[in-house]
């Protein structure tokens, strides 16, 4: 039998775990981790031709970091773990028109692009590999997948524990959630540090504003939710074990 306090802790922990998994999954699949706001003065690029060129090369699978970064900077872009988007006229020729109809154009990062090395000068192979940015980018790609995988593994262990009517595996479930929460937090940290380093070595348009987006905050919220779920699972497992030990000792006495 499981005491009502432990059962309540397990239910609340399960709900927190579910919310964290949903938040992190939505964050991974959306492109609003970072957003840029360019001033109308971005039309300073030679009568729109440069902006038109940026919009054209943005979608290529072999586009380098410099090209898509410049497009994000100049064209009100948004960036995620798997997606990058820019705001362009419905017809790319509209860059030369005074009031074009604007649409959002998105492009997914390919696996090859996710594993591609970053360079000290973005897009310039001759500048040498930037190991710190390269590993930060790979970590921000891998860690959320590891986090979601740990949560699903914890769910499987929890289901097996329910079928066996045992609360003992709950301690392992809690540890898995703790690791998942740390991975989620590390993902956000890697992303923010990587963006800071990119901005330091890039030529940013004058007057451009940039800020974290709601997708990043979803991932950030998922981390404490996973850690709180871990605390509840670990508390329930340890408290139940201590109570069972005391009851066993009492019966023996």
Image (spheres, grey):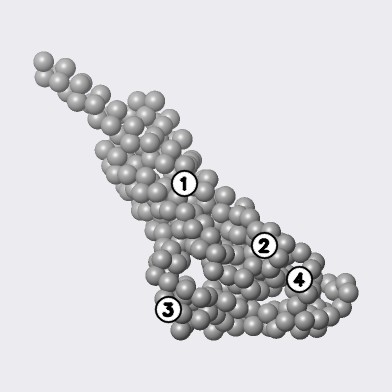
Secondary structure at badge 2 equals strand
Identify the residue at horizontal 85%, vertical 74% (top origin).
Answer: 100
Q: Nearer the viewer, mark 2 or mark 4?
A: 4
Label 2 environment density (alpha carbons within 10 Å; few <14, some 14–19, many ≥20): many
Structural distance between the alpha carbons of marks 2 and 4: 12 Å
Question: Residue 113: percent from the left, percent from the top?
Answer: 49, 76
Label 3 sits on a secondary structure element that is loop
* Alpha-carbon span between mark 2 and mark 1: 25 Å
Left/right placement of residue 38 relative to residue 217 reads right
Viewport quadrant of the N terminus: top left
Between 224 and 39, the one lying in front of the other is 39
Where does label 2 land, which residue?
36
Q: Looking at the picture, does residue 251 appear above or below residue 235? A: above
Residue lying at 29% horizontally and 44% vertically, measured from the top left: 172
Observer-side mark, 3 or 1, equals 3
Q: Residue at x 71, y 70 (%)?
A: 75
Asked whether disc 2 touches disc 4, contact meaning CB atoms under 8 Å apart, the reply is: no
Q: Earlier in the sequence, mark 1 or mark 4?
A: 4
**Circle 4 residue:** 42
Q: Which tag, 2 or 1, sits closer to the chain's start?
A: 2
C-alpha span from label 1 to label 4: 37 Å
Using the image as rendered, state which of residue 218 and residue 132 is in the foreground: 132
Say which mark, if any, is on residue 223.
1
Of callouts 3 and 2, which one flags the residue occurring earlier in the amino acid sequence? 2
- Residue 90 in percent (x, y) is at 79, 76
């Amino acid at each position: 039998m499981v005491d009502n306090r432990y059962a309540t802790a397990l239910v609340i922990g399960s709900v927190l775990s579910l919310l964290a998994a949903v938040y992190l999954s939505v964050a991974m699949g959306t492109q609003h981790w970072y957003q840029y706001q360019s001033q109308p003065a971005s039309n300073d690029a030679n009568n729109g031709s440069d902006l038109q060129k940026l919009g054209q090369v943005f979608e290529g699978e072999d586009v380098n970091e410099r090209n898509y970064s410049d497009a994000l900077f100049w064209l009100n872009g948004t960036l995620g773990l798997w997606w990058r988007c820019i705001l362009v006229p419905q017809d790319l020729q509209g860059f030369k028109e005074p009031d074009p109809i604007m649409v959002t154009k998105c492009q997914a990062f390919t696996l090859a692009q996710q594993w591609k090395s970053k360079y000290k000068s973005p897009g310039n192979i001759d500048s040498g590999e930037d190991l710190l940015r390269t590993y930060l980018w790979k970590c921000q790609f891998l860690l959320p997948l590891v986090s979601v995988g740990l949560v699903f593994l914890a769910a499987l262990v929890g289901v097996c524990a329910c079928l066996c009517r045992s609360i003992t595996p709950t301690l392992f479930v809690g540890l898995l959630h703790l690791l998942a929460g740390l991975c989620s937090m590390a993902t956000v940290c890697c992303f923010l540090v990587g963006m800071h380093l990119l901005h330091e070595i890039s030529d940013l348009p004058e007057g451009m504003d940039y800020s974290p987006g709601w997708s990043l905050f979803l991932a950030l919220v998922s981390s404490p939710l996973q850690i709180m779920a871990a605390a509840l699972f670990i508390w329930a497992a340890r408290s139940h074990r201590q109570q069972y030990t005391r009851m066993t000792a009492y019966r023996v006495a």
